[in-house]
Structures are given as structure tokens and as C-alpha cells.
Image (cartoon, grey):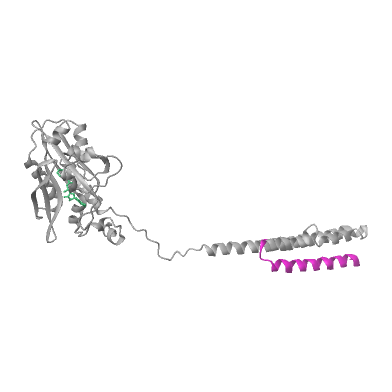
Amino acid sequence: MSDALAALRARLDDLREQARSVAAGVDRDADLNEGKARFLGRKGAFGPVMRELGSLDRAQRPAAGALINEAKQAIEAVFAEARARIEQKALDAALEAGRIDVTLPGRRSAPGATHPVQAVLDELVDLLVELGFALADGPEVETEHYNFDQLNMPASHPARDMQDTFYLQGDLLLRTQTSPVQIRAMEDTKPPVRIIAPGKVFRCDADVTHSPTFHQIEGLWVDTDVTMADLKGVLSYFLRRLFGADRGVRFRPSFFPFTEPSVEVDVEFGDGWMEVLGAGMVHPRVLRNVGFDPTAVQGFAFGLGVDRLAMVRYGITDIRYLFENDQRFLTQFARGR
Ligand code: FA5
């Protein structure tokens, strides 16, 4: 080999050595690209080498060209290896960061549960449907006409004070009871009428047995020969099915403008009694208000306090537990706990 070629080889070997040490020192993509450009880029170290090729003897040029190509390829390989190393390192870091320890205990999702009020409501509705009552519905935002007037409580009637009312605009209000659904049902159907109407009602009321939003189920049965004995029979049967035969139940005379006679029903609870419903024989004036003839048809109606029945059912002593959404209270009703 001529001196010129030997010198070229030495120079190329030196470049390879330099490239190897540059490639070994980079660990970021950008540095790698910059390092590679220093050797193989347009203005890289091979530029001057190529220019020198022209000053060699023509006979030596092929051998020199081969040496240069070989060196270039070797340097390409050095940087390709460095790139693979950087990529592998990035992959390892990503895998490490996203590592899942399959031996850790799983995160348990808390199972939901039917709310005690909903559970009792469903149970009551099932029982009443079994007794032949059909479901009816009415709006929560009512008019004074349906919530009061048609139920024999005209504007001046003192009984309106029995239920502290949330009034809205005009003659609209939040219904204080499910009884307006009685009127709507009787307006829609000729006798016999036998419906129940579960739903939310609202009163400006709050203590251990009174909630501002609570639930009632209205019941109404109008036909040609419905009597007070039917009322007592249906309610007694219903309460026995709910609480068993041993639970004390008492009927007390009471007053509602839309029933005559009227009763309230208490069930034994703790050391005393819990009032759970109001009921009575539909007042003749109410029947007339919807176009029925009170000499031809009679009926009974009742309004169950669902939240109170839930309290008795589950031994809950303060109604506020039912709507405070305290998990410690609610999870007690989750099945399988
Ligand atoms: C009424 O609401 C009548 N509409 C019931 C009725 C219907 C009578 C049909 C005759 C014929 P009263 O205001 O008593 O009545 O309420 C009925 C039941 O709802 C009560 O016995 C009680 O169980 C429940 N209740 C009343 N106020 C509240 C309250 N603030 N929070 C929880 N439950 C209540």
C-alpha cells in the first residue's frame, strides 16, 4: 500500500475512533443527530477527506474510495447502535414508570344499595298492587286548585295551616300531599276507581320525625259499596303483612277536610307509637267536586308516610338519617355486607 493510502487509512481509523467515542457519550436523540452530522453531515469530517481524494493518483482512487466507504459504513453502524441503545433505554424507562405490581391488593369498588326509603316504597307498592290497586301519577309542582280547593280546603279554610306549604309563583306550589292525585284520578275515570299514587311531597317542616321532603303513597278506592270496614280491613291486612301480626296497631279518630269520618293510624315503635298514615271515607263534597254522585258511590282514601314506615321497618330513630347521605348509615343496607 502506498504512503498516501496508508495515511488515508490512518486518518479514517482515527475518525472511526472519534465517532465511537462521540456515539458512546450521547444519550439523547438530539445529541446523537448532532454527533452523527459532525461526521457524516454535509459539512462533516468526510468533506475534506473527499476533497483529498482528488489529489491522489488516479490508480489509487478506487482503493481509496473503498476505504472511505468502509469507514463511512462503520461510522453509520456506530450511530445506529447508539440509536438502538437510546431507544431501548427510553422503552425501559417507560415500562418501569408504568409497572404494575400484580401482587398488590385490588381497589374494591363499594357496591351500591337500594336506599331504605326506596326499598320500603317498592315493598309497599308491591303489596298494594297485589291487593288490586293500579298505579297513578301526578305532578310534584301542583296548583292550589288540586292540592287544596278540590280537597275541600278553600283559601280561607283553617286546615290549610295544617300543612306548611312551599309556595311558588302564582297559584303554583310544591304539593304538600299526594291527595291531589285522588282528584286527578277521579277526573280521569268513572267509578270504580282503585288507585295508589306514590311520590315525593314537600312541607316546611323539620325535626326527628318530620322531613321537608318526604314520600307518601296515596290510596283511593271508590265504588258502589265501599265502607269504613273495607278501609280498616285493607289497612290492617297491609300493616300485618308489613310488620307481622304481633306489632301493635291503633286507629285514632282524626280530622281531614277531604274525609269524613277520618282516622290516623299509629304502629308500635320503641317505647311508644309512630303515626304512619292518615285515612278516611272520601268526603261527599270531594266526590261532588269531580262530578260523582255521593248517594250512588262511596270510597275510602289513605295517605301513607313512607319514610316513617321505613323508620319503623329498620328501627331508625331519626328521620334525618334518611336524607343526610352518610355512607356509614347507607352501607348498612348494602346487600352481602
Ligand atoms: C295527609 O297528608 C293526608 N293527605 C293523608 C290522607 C290521605 C288522609 C287520604 C285521608 C285520606 P298527614 O299530614 O297526616 O296527612 O300526613 C300523612 C302521613 O305522612 C303522616 O301520618 C306521616 O306518616 C307522614 N308525614 C307527614 N308529615 C311528614 C313529614 N314532615 N316528614 C315525614 N313524614 C311525614
Residue 239 higher or lower than 4, as above or below: above
Find residue 13 and report its horizontal and vertical position in percent: 80, 67
Q: Quadrant of residue 70?
A: bottom right
Q: Nearer the viewer, residue 145 or 7?
A: 145
Most extreme residue toward the left, as rendered? Answer: 229
Q: Please state if 53 lies on the left or on the right of 97 as rendered.
A: right
Residue 76 higher or lower than 191, as above or below: below
Residue 184 higher or lower than 306, as above or below: above
Main SS of the magenta part reads: helix
Q: Residue at x 13, y 49 (%)?
A: 239
Q: Is 80 one of the magenta-colored residues?
A: no
Most extreme residue toward the right, as rendered? Answer: 57
**Numbered range of the magenta stretch:** 1-29
Quadrant position of the C terminus in the picture: bottom left
Q: Is 22 one of the magenta-colored residues?
A: yes
Q: Is residue 2 visible?
A: no
Q: Please state if 37 lies on the left or on the right of 246 as rendered.
A: right
Quadrant position of the N terminus in the picture: bottom right
